[in-house]
Each structure stands twice: as C-alpha cells, then as structure tokens.
Amino acid sequence: MSHSISDWNNPHRHQSLLRLSALTQDQLNPLIVQAKVQCQGGQLPTYIPYLAQANPTWVAVQVQRIQGEGVAAGDIYHSFPLMSVIKPFVLLFLLEQLGIEAVFSQVGMESSDQPFNSLAQLQADGGKPRNPMINSGAIALAGRLPGKDAASRCETLRQWLNQRSQSGLFLDEAMLQSVRSLPNERNRAIANLLAASGYLDHPEIALDTYNHVCCLSGTVRNLAQLGMLLAQDTSLISPQHRHIVNDILITCGLYQASSRFAVEVGLPTKSGVSGAMVSVVPSQGAIACYSPALDETGNSKAGLFIVQQLAQGLELNGLG
C-alpha cells in the first residue's frame, strides 16, 4: 500500500509511517513534481559563471537510511559542487584532527543574522568569525587544514571524507577555474581582516584552499552518504564531534533563515549556493537535495520545500 504526501497529514495514519525508514518510492515521486513548481521564481548565482549555466528546473533527492535501503527521485545522476555544504565536513574533519579547543579558538559558534559573506559582521566581532558556516569561519578553518598548498589540503580532506563515508567526491577542475575567473573581493577582504586579527596565517593559501574544497563535487547519493557521518554513531567519528556539528547546523546552517527553519523543521541542515542541501535526521538517516534555483537568502527553494515536507509528513523533527 502506498501513501501520498497528502496522506501524511491524516491523523489516523499508522504510527509506522512516522519514521524515515518507512518512506517509499511512491511517496517520494510526487514530491519531486511538487518541488519543481517551487523552482519558479528562483535565481541562479551569477558571480560563478559555471553555476549560472545550471538548469533551474533540476530537482533531485536521495534519502539514505540507517535501517533500509536508500530511496531517490528526480535528476539524481547530475553531479554538482558542494560549495558551502562542505563547511560542516571541514569542521568535522578539524574537530577530529585538532580537537574542540583548538578549533574554537579560531572560530565562534554563535548564529548570525547577516549574509553569509558579511564583512560588517566580522568587523563588529573584532575579526573573529561568528561561526564555521559563514565564509569568514570557513576561510579561517581552511587555513588550518593540513598540507603545503590548497591542492594537497583539498585532497587530504577529499580522501578522508570518501574513506569514512564510502562516498565518491571528486574535485571539479572546471568549476574551480570558473570560481577563480572572477575575483571575489569580499572573500579577499574577509581573509585580510582575519589575518590582521590573528586568526589566519597565510590568507592567500587559505582562500585558495577554500575555493578548492567548495568545488568538491558529487551526486545526491554522494552527499547523502556524507550526511550519514552526522546521522549515526560510528567508531570512525567521535560522537561528541558529531553532536557539535549538528548543533551548529541547527542554528547556523541556513544563514539568516536558520532560526525559522529550526522552529518549523528542526533538522540540522546545510545549504550551498550550487543548490545543494543536506539534512541530518539523527539516528535515522540523511536527506540530500539538489536544485539550483535559489531563494533570496541563497538557499535552494526546492530543497527547502522537500525537507520541510518530509520532516512534517514523517514527523522527523523531535525524533532521535
């Protein structure tokens, strides 16, 4: 027996439906159709030329589950750069490598109501990044990745993530060249202020590293496999570090939209300007979305819709 999205709002549905493990293909397929409507009016970023070439109607979702096989729908074979979705995994890697004290001596854990690339926020905070999910925090942490240059730092992170998640991330060289083709003066100003404030030693290497790791790419399946690192206990990752990343995602993962999303949906979630998005369902699994059409905050319109519908329909928030 299949169940549609509308069935989930039926108060008489069986309690077994209220888990990610009960999600069926017949439930997911119509959700993609509805999500494509949400793409209308969305914008593609123009400051990275390669991203501006994406098809704004693409929508893909992969649900990876601790119990049961994964289920996917939509344009699932398209690969895309993770962009800012890599940020929580940079944080996770450095927590594992350096420890909590060393990481948070470089970056805070407070939410921000400013845009993700706000220089004014960094200035107001005396040059210390507000959190690891905005550009200032991610650039500061990129400066702590091990390696002599950006390429070796990115490769170390890529191999570590792929080995632990069984994913297949790769560096999209064409996307990296596109990112480099137009100067990002805001990020450069952020890096210079970080250096002047003592939170960055080599701003040029850190900026290049940040650009590299943002161009790590894969499919929704790869992204969902990454999300599983934050969804379940494993001997490969410290539970304390996993919880820290998830807690920061709740308050900081969607920039200015984080607080509202935390109340309405309640799942640790990170978005990227490519239209990538990953949500963690603790103790149950991960939801990865890709749809390039963005809202005014820079989050995927269809991705937000899909995760919200799944969270409400399966009553995922507050479980686990």
Image (cartoon, helix red, strand yellow):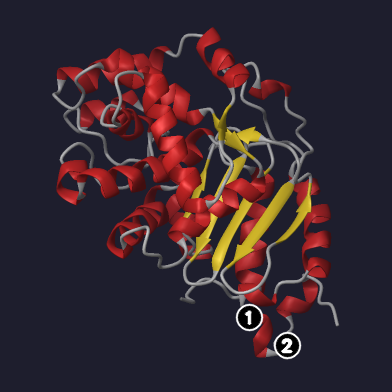
Pick whichever, 189 or 278, lies toward us. 278
Q: Position of residue 249 (x, y in %)?
A: 41, 52
Give the residue type that dot 1 points to: Leu
For disc 1, the neighbor class at 10 Å (few under 14, some 14 to 19, many from 20) is some
192 left or right, relative to 250: left
Residue sitting at 28 percent across and 49 percent down? 96
Q: Callout 1: helix, strand or loop?
A: loop
Check the image and report above or below for 104 versus 273. below
Q: Does residue 199 appear left or right of residue 221 in this picture?
A: left
Residue named by callout 2: 13
Q: Which numbered disc covers residue 18?
A: 1
Quarter of the figure with residue 125 = top left
Of pointers 2 and 1, the one earlier in the residue sequence? 2
From the viewer's perspective, is residue 54 above or below residue 258? above
Callouts 2 and 1 close, C-beta under 8 Å: yes
Image quarter where the N terminus lies is bottom right
What residue lies at 62% left-to-right and 70% top-to-bottom?
Answer: 312
Residue 247 position, x and y percent, is 35, 59
Relative to 22, 37 lies left or right: right
Q: Position of residue 181 (x, y in %)?
A: 55, 8
- Comparing marks 2 and 1, which lies closer to the viewer? 1
* Residue depicted at x 66% and y 86%: 16
